[in-house]
Amino acid sequence: MEFTLRKIEEIEYKYLMKYYHFLKFAEDEMMIGFKTKDKIKEDWIDYYASGISVSSTGAERIVYALLNGKGIGQPNSSPVGSDLFFEVEDAYIHIDLKTVQTDNIGDYTNSIFVGENQNSYRGVIKKNNGKQENYYPHLPYVYNKDKKGEKICLSFFVTILFEKDTLDILVISIMCMPNGMLESHYGSKVLKAGKNPGKTRFNFSNTENFELLDGEKKRIQVIYFDETMKNEYRKKLTFYENLYKKQIYR
């Protein structure tokens, strides 16, 4: 099967919107689920204070339960992949959850860390010092290439920003990192240097649109934005706020 670059983006956009609409529909259930920790707070708060990231662990449990319960596709048992890995009619879909607290808000505003087992975007990372580094993820562009059952590989990330002290949720979004075959169009602007050699970040603020599709179709969909958050946070999250205000479903 031949995948044109436009066809790849059509499939990416189709499933991005499927998951966005589902999570938007389930927004109330998510928010209720995130608050269930408060009922037993006295039993875990001392351990959280000692460094256990209850915010990320608890959030993952809620979101993954909702997505698994949705029943989109067949879960795949491959050990190489994101935390959620499904096969659907025309794609293999990887979904990973990224949680960030406001003391590290810079890790959320315009790029996010992505693992080698979570994306297929082989390319060049251009560093601030002018040097370049080749990046080699573990996922293929296409599963079963040139064989029966050939399907494109998709990478999605659900991102959640928490207020550090209260654990209140400030932003929830879902985004699609381009398939590796799109490197011939997007080049190096998808990738940003990670904190360690060989690691990368998805530079989503630099690739916010499906550039090969008609109209202004966004690779990032904002499911929730707390419009009552502190101004010190809001000023740093204008990228998300602007997207949120433009979306039809709010």
Image (cartoon, rainbow, N blue to C red):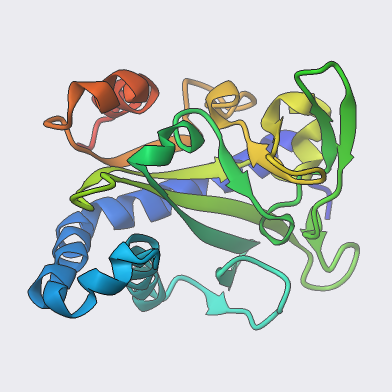
Task: Please give the name of the residue rendered at 61% of the width and 42% of the height, measured from the top-left corner.
Answer: 177
In this view, 156 is above or below 225? below
Identify the residue at image location x=57%, y=29%.
210
Q: Is 38 displayed left or right of 130 in the figure?
A: left
- 16 vs 52: above or below: above
- Determine if residue 4 is in view: no
List x then y, in percent, for residue 154.
64, 54
Q: Is residue 154 visible?
A: yes
Asked if residue 34 is positioned above or below residue 42 in the image, the reply reads above
Query: Where 119 falls versus 51 (above or below)?
Result: above
Q: Examine the image and state in which quarter residue 9 appears.
A: top right
Coordinates of residue 70 in the picture (x, y in percent): 36, 72
Q: Is residue 43 left or right of residue 83?
A: left
Q: Residue furthest bottom?
A: 77
Which quadrant holds the N terminus? bottom right
Depth check: give the residue in front, 180 or 159: 159
Question: In the shown orientation, is residue 66 left or right of residue 125?
Answer: left
Q: Nearer the viewer, residue 99 or 16?
A: 99
Q: What residue is drawn where x is 65% and y is 39%? A: 201
Q: Residue at x 69, y 31 (%)?
A: 190
User: Which residue is at the far left?
Assistant: 39
Quadrant position of the C terminus in the picture: top left
Q: Where is residue 186 shown, x and y percent of the image? A: 74, 26
Q: Nearer the viewer, residue 19 or 28?
A: 28
